[in-house]
Every structure is written in C-alpha cells, then in structure tokens.
C-alpha cells in the first residue's frame, strides 16, 4: 500500500499570511505514460463533507479560490494557501489515486493564530 | 444541482450486517465511478471501496476486504455498500463519493451517514 504522510499535523497561521502543508508518498505517484501525478487535496470542515480543492497535484477545481495552489511531483507535494482567510480553517487531506487502496494522509488541522 | 445522499446508517451490534445506500440527483450515477470513504470519530479519512461505472470492477480497502461488498442497483441512480461481520472499528460516518473513473479524484461528496457498531 502507498502510505501518505502529511506534515505538520497542525498549523496556526495569522490572517493574511501563507500556510504551507506538505504531503509525502511512500512511492512515486507520477505515472510516466501521461506525466501526471495522481494526487488530490481536500478541505474538510466540521459538519460538512470534504471538498475537492486540487487534482493532478496542481490543477485547481472549478470554483476554488486562486489563493489555493498545489505543487510537487513524484513523492513530495505541497498545498499552499496564500493570504489566509478565516473561512480556510479546516482539516486538509492529501490523497493518492494512483493505486488501490487509494490512501489519504492523516490530515493537517489549520487554525488561525 | 448535483447531489449525493447516503442513507441506511444506524446502531448495530458487532457481528451483524447493515446495508448503506447512495442516491444521486442532478446527474446519472452510471456515468461515474463511485466510492465509499469513511471517517471514524476523531480520526482522518479512510478510503473503503470503489465500483466502476459499469459495475464490473470493484476494489476494497484492506480493513474491509472480504466483509464489505459494493454494488450498483438496478436503478441508474443508486449504489450500495453491504457491510457484514461488523466490528466496533467500523464505527464511522460513511460518505459516498463520485469520481470520473476509478483512478480519478473524488469530486462530489455526499453528506454522509453514521454507522455505530456497539453492543
């Protein structure tokens, strides 16, 4: 199984500042035939279902604010939230969809400092 | 508007069975792969199972393999998760989720249904 490890587990950032969340996979999730990284990022707020933010590691889902961006390739990935807003408080998960079982990272809890 | 609604959760004793249902509105379920993802109390997200759009391909997570079965209903807009030999560790909110294909991101999540396994 591919193990997804996020860091840090929790993060406190001031409003208007940048938040950075890292995700590392235990093996490459880059598919050489299409040069795509099979990684997605989700935002999960209490009482709501998770929401897709980013897929193919760096493609923003329609309707997601452009302060959210994803980067990385192979085994190391980053979710960056620029100019943090109060509504960005949530738990963020990375997930690989390269191979079953489609594993998630353990989550990173983002709070306002 | 596109929606997924999971139902069928409840309280069940260890060792017993339960069937969850997932219904769609605003789109045809059979055009998409469908997943179940769960979240135990105080824990993170855990992928459970997936079925292809035609129902012929199914995969399961390690912790449910051999006990859970995912299937599509006769109706174009229903999907099921049959859960047998339930354990307390299966206690979680279960989400049904849509994806364009099996190896695709999860783009639409339903509201979730709570399953509690307890004596």
Image: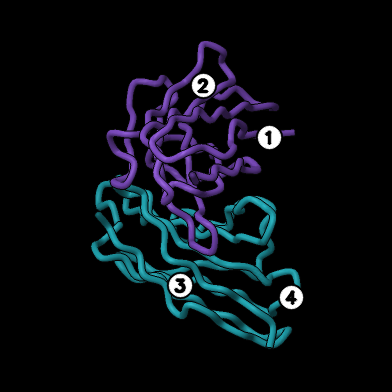
Chain colours: A cyan, B purple
SS of the residue under disc 1: strand
Tell me the chain of label 3: A
Q: Is residue B42 left or right of residue A76?
A: right
Distance Cα–Cα, label 1 vs label 3: 30 Å
Tell me the chain of label 4: A
Give the percent coordinates (x, y) of residue B19.
50, 27
Tell me the chain of label 2: B
The extreme front residue here reads B119
Q: Nearer the viewer, mark 1 or mark 3?
A: 1
Q: Which residue is mark 1?
A: B3
Sequence-first tag of 3 and 4:
3
Q: Mark 2 vs mark 1: same chain?
A: yes
Give the percent coordinates (x, y) of residue A113.
68, 88
Q: Are marks 2 and 4 in contact (CB under 8 Å)?
A: no
Q: Nearer the viewer, mark 3 or mark 2?
A: 2
Query: Could you tell me which quadrant the N terminus of chain B lies in?
Result: top right
Q: Which residue is mark 4?
A: A85
Badge 3: residue crowd in 10 Å (few <14, some 14–19, many ≥20)? many
Q: Which residue is mark 2?
A: B30
Q: Which residue is mark 3?
A: A78
Quadrant of the rendered structure where residue B57 is?
top left
Give the percent coordinates (x, y) of residue B29.
56, 24
Badge 1: residue crowd in 10 Å (few <14, some 14–19, many ≥20)? some
Tell me the chain of label 1: B
Q: Is residue B30 left or right of residue A15?
A: left
Distance Cα–Cα, label 2 vs label 1: 14 Å
Q: Are marks 3 and 4 in contact (CB under 8 Å)?
A: no
Given residues A109 and B102, the one toward you in this image is A109
Q: Are marks 1 and 4 in contact (CB under 8 Å)?
A: no
Sequence-first tag of 2 and 1:
1
């Amino acid at each position: 199984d591919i193990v997804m490890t996020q860091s840090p587990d929790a993060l406190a950032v001031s409003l208007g500042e940048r938040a950075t969340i890292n995700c590392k996979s235990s093996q490459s999730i880059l598919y050489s035939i299409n040069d795509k990284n099979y990684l997605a990022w989700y935002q999960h707020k209490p009482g709501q279902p998770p929401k897709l933010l980013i897929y193919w590691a760096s493609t923003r889902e329609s309707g997601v604010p452009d302060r959210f961006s994803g980067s990385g390739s192979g085994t190391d990935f980053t979710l960056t939230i620029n100019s943090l807003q109060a509504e960005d408080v949530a738990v963020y998960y990375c997930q690989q969809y390269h191979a079953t079982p489609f594993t998630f990272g353990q989550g990173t809890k983002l709070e306002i400092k | 508007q596109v929606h997924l609604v999971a139902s069928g959760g409840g309280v069940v004793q260890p060792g017993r069975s339960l069937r969850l249902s997932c219904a769609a509105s605003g789109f045809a379920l059979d055009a998409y792969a469908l997943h179940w993802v769960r979240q135990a109390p105080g824990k993170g997200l855990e992928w459970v199972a997936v079925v292809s759009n035609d129902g012929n391909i199914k995969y399961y997570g390690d912790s449910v393999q051999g006990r859970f079965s995912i299937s599509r209903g006769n109706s174009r807009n229903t999907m099921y998760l049959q859960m047998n030999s339930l354990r307390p560790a299966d206690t979680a909110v279960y989400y049904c989720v849509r994806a364009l294909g099996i190896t695709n991101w999860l783009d639409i999540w339903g509201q979730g249904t709570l399953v509690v396994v307890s004596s």
